[in-house]
Image: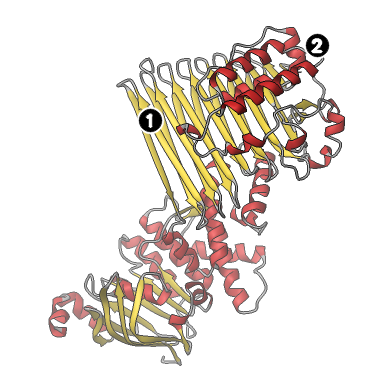
Amino acid sequence: MSAPLTARIAAEHASTLAALPPQLAGGVRRRAAMAALAADGLPGARDENWKYANLRTLERQSFTPAPLDPRAAGAAAPAALPPRLAGFARYVFIDGNFAPALSDALDAGPARVLPLAVFESESAPPPAHPARDQRFALLNAAFATDGAAITVAAAGAARIELLFVASAAAHSGASYPRVELRLGPHARLTLIERHLSAGDCASFVASAVAAELDRAAALEHYRLQELDDRAVLFDSLSATLGADARYALRAIGSGALAARSTVEVRLAGERAELTLAAASLGDRQQVQDTYALVEHLAPDTRTEETFRGIAAGRSRVAFNGRILVARAARGADSRQSLRGLLAGAQAEIDVRPQLEIYTDEVSASHGATAGKLDDQMLFYLLSRGLDRETAQRALKWAFLGDVVARIEPPPLRQQIETRLAAQMLGGTTFRELL
Amino acid sequence: MTGAPLLTIRDLTVSVGGKQILDGLTLAVATGEVHAIMGPNGSGKSTLAHVLAGRPGYQVTAGSILYQGQDLLALAPEERARRGLFLGFQYPVEIPGVNNVYLLKAALNAQRRQRGLPEVDAFEFLTLVREKMQLMQMEDSFLSRGVNEGFSGGEKKRNEILQMLVLEPTLAVLDETDSGLDIDALKVVAAGVKSLRAPARSCLLVTHYQRLLEYVVPDFVHVLVRGRIARSGDRSLALELERRGYDWVSGAAA
């Protein structure tokens, strides 16, 4: 990152902090993050893990958060919200700020949901983010004033939907959605994290999710990125799993002009298990870039990683899946299946598996392919009378099946399929494909 | 038996990857006829089947194919299919994620649109498919599975015949549908092919062995050697081949 950019962020940070109400909690976190960011800097195009991310937009970006008042910013929001999902408590955030009028009550069930500002006023600041590639998480931590803190008590179970609505255009302020998750021993949480736009707007969003899963906790996490196709998103996800914890992460990214997702999961306890299934869809000029680092740090930990990306138009879709097996992770098991589909002559796709193993007792397999639709499959469908366009759509749909099929709640899957079908298939009679 | 000409192949020469496979093949199939194309490995049998279906990568360097009086080679593969030409593949591809019932319905509707008919009624369609599945001894669960996904060799072949039965082609080209089948599966496949035999339909059976022909008796048998028809006859030709081996005709054609 250029020094002038760092200086500008620091200046905007200083004036942002000066304008905040003095009683607002989280000041320690914001100042510590800014100090770390000033030392590390944001990544630049020469950073190997960032070469697909569109970092140029940062030069013209204002980092000052969008206004705190959700009523002003979110007047048009309710119409943009997706239908309610039965059984899920819903919490809505407009430009990163909690919108109680659009949300369920913050009741004290097995899951405690608190606006971050309230949470931070009650508890000690969380430890600083581990460095690695979480520098956009630092940007988030430096500016975020609100968000969701979710704590699921030992053996508790909850289903929660978080909607992050971007309504501000970038020139009127950035949006910093922030989620802090703590799952107690044997706790279970199904979490939907959905990023969308209210109306057409070129928002700038830097979101961060930090999750800690205690012993035998289970987190089923759906991340849906459906921002307006002029928005820019940098999202960071950092998770640490204790012994026997299970993390099922399903991510579908189809929106935004440029989206970069940085995922770092630490399998810190024995037998901790991650299943990551991600799909990215790029069209027109979109950039969909994902970097996923999984660290096996304890014995008998497991990872299963599936990626399916489709690049159409002039889009760029990248998935960099790095799996590290530490010395201590005897008996680790890691499987990776990364596939990219090139659906446009000027599109670009890059799927990259990286496996680093520092122990002997490990079982690992990985496969990565990038290419066009299979000619034999296409000819088979044509030979049955399907027109070329229909045949291609059917094959693209099938390609995503490995990820879409893993979305468990049926109404959620239906919503996602409807959106994907509208985007990919022009809304044709896709039901028959299912 | 002999009806109007349906398929007329004249002096067909075809190359694949620069290598000439068919060398001036001539063949006429009339409506209602069943022809068997036999021949040793590499004689061009499968090439003929694929050229008829319009598979990319096959260069027709000379000759012509008329189908229903039209220039078949000018039609895209999907247009050929909609005009009633069906290829039963020797090695049907697996397409996970596209389910069988979708493919059957989309294929049937593509044909119906071609004929100016409305889309098939959902109930009638399922009734039709179930009836044909029973004939092919296929389980109901098959419908919701991906096309050929995880199917055994025999199941794939039965699926080809099922598609054929649902689509009721005017010309069925079956490329070694009998290969790799045990005797029970062969009987099921043969019953399927036989059930489609009708005065309005023709069939080209491409096969290496004559055992399918015991169940589906052809009107004509042709022996293909080095890209052209070396000998034609009736069913007895297949039996004679079985007895004397392909060397007999290969030598004669040399």
- Amino acid at the residue labelled 1: Leu
- Name the mark on residue A27: none
Q: Position of residue B203 (x, y in %)?
A: 41, 79
Q: Position of residue A369 (x, y in %)?
A: 41, 46
| Residue A27 appears in the rendering | yes
Residue A1, image quadrant = top right
Front in this rendered view, residue B59 or B203: B59
Mark 2 to mark 1 CA distance (whole Å): 47 Å
Residue drawn at (45%, 28%), measured in percent from left and top? A303
Q: Residues within 10 Å of mark 2 (few under 14, many from 20)?
A: few
Residue A430, image quadrant = bottom right
Q: Is residue B38 above or below residue A58?
A: below
Q: Is residue B244 left or right of residue B218?
A: left
The answer for which chain carries disc 1 is A
Q: Is residue A357 above or below residue A253?
A: above
Residue drawn at (26%, 87%), measured in percent from left and top? B233
Q: Earlier in the sequence, mark 2 or mark 1?
A: 2
Q: Which residue is mark 2?
A: A22
Front in this rendered view, residue A334 or B249: A334
Q: Secondary structure at mark 1?
A: strand
Q: Is residue A248 left or right of residue B182?
A: right
- Amino acid at the residue labelled 2: Pro
Residue drawn at (47%, 34%), measured in percent from left and top? A46
| Residue A409 appears in the rendering | no
- Name the mark on residue A355: 1
Q: Residues within 10 Å of mark 1 (few under 14, many from 20)?
A: some
**On the rendered image, what quadrant is the C terminus of chain B found in?**
bottom left
